[in-house]
Image: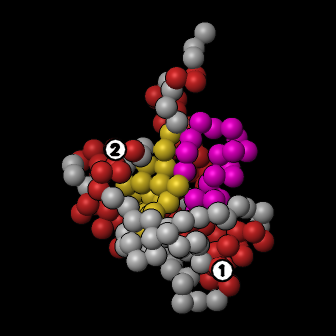
């Protein structure tokens, strides 16, 4: 009999610019799917910049999440270099975040943890950026939610593989 309670949970963080729009949306969407499947995983989010640290998610993010049945409780924070040790997967929302995270990575092991969100969506095509909806309307937030949900099955597969390999 194996003791699954002694295993560490698989840890995922999403990273966007200010941690108030895209990354908290992705966090809450994935969290619901993880809970629905009872996967041993933890998900959170952060930003490449710290100017919104402590702020709640953007009201349009909250509205979009709630409209689709997701939670939305959030406090923004800035990603820190030492956090690479705490995560199995660091998911960037666009190429700019990817570059910043790779520059922050201390070594190849850190860099190997970084992926673009849309790289988990086989139908994404060549443009893997999730556009920033901050200066847009509610429709842009709905589009971000759609892009996030399309990537979720691939992210869940990655989490399952990580849990299987750890066990």
The way the protein has been coloured in the rendering is secondary structure
- Residue 165: % across, % down: 46, 29
The answer to whether residue 63 is left or right of residue 88 is right
User: Relative to residue 144, is residue 140 depicted above or below?
Assistant: below
Q: Is residue 95 left or right of residue 155?
A: left
Q: Residue at x 34, y 49 (%)?
A: 84
In this rendering, does residue 102 appear at all? yes
Instruction: Indicate the position of residue 151 as horizontal and vertical percent values.
Output: 58, 59
Q: Position of residue 124 (x, y in %)?
A: 53, 66
Give coordinates of residue 123: x percent, y percent. Answer: 57, 63
Q: Residue furthest left?
A: 107
Marker disc for residue 162: none
The quadrant the N terminus occupies is top right
Q: How many numbered marks are there?
A: 2
Label 1 neighbourhood size at 10 Å, few (<14), some (14-19), many (20+)?
many
User: Which class describes the residues within 10 Å of circle 2: few (<14), some (14-19), or many (20+)?
Assistant: few
Residue ranking furthest to the front:
54
Which residue in the protein does label 2 denote?
Answer: 85
Q: In the figure, residue 56 lies in which quadrant?
A: bottom right
| Residue 17, visible in the rendered structure | no
Per the rendered image, the range of residues in magenta is 26-43
6 relative to 31, above or below: above
- Label 2 element class: helix
The vertical placement of 32 against 163, above or below, is below
Q: Give me the residue at 51% from left, 26% from top.
A: 7
Numbered badge on residue 60: 1
Mark 1 → mark 2, Cα distance in angstroms: 32 Å
Specify which label sits upstream in the sequence, 1 or 2. Answer: 1
- Which one is nearer the viewer's eye here, 141 or 61? 61
Q: Place residue 18 in its image quadrant.
A: bottom left
């Amino acid at each position: 009999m194996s003791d699954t309670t002694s295993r560490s949970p698989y840890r995922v963080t999403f990273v966007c610019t200010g941690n108030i729009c895209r990354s908290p949306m992705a966090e809450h969407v994935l969290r619901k799917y993880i809970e629905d499947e009872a996967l041993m995983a933890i998900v959170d989010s952060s930003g490449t910049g710290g100017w919104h640290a402590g702020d709640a998610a953007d009201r349009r993010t909250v509205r979009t999440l709630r409209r689709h049945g997701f939670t939305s409780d959030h406090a923004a924070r800035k990603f820190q270099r030492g956090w690479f040790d705490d995560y199995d997967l660091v998911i960037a929302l666009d190429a700019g975040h990817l570059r910043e995270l790779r520059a922050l990575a201390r070594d190849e092991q850190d860099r190997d943890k970084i992926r673009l969100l849309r790289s988990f969506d086989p139908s994404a095509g060549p443009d893997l950026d999730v556009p920033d909806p901050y200066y847009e309307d509610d429709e842009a937030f709905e589009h971000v939610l759609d892009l996030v949900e399309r990537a979720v099955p691939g992210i869940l597969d990655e989490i399952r593989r990580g849990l299987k390999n750890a066990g």
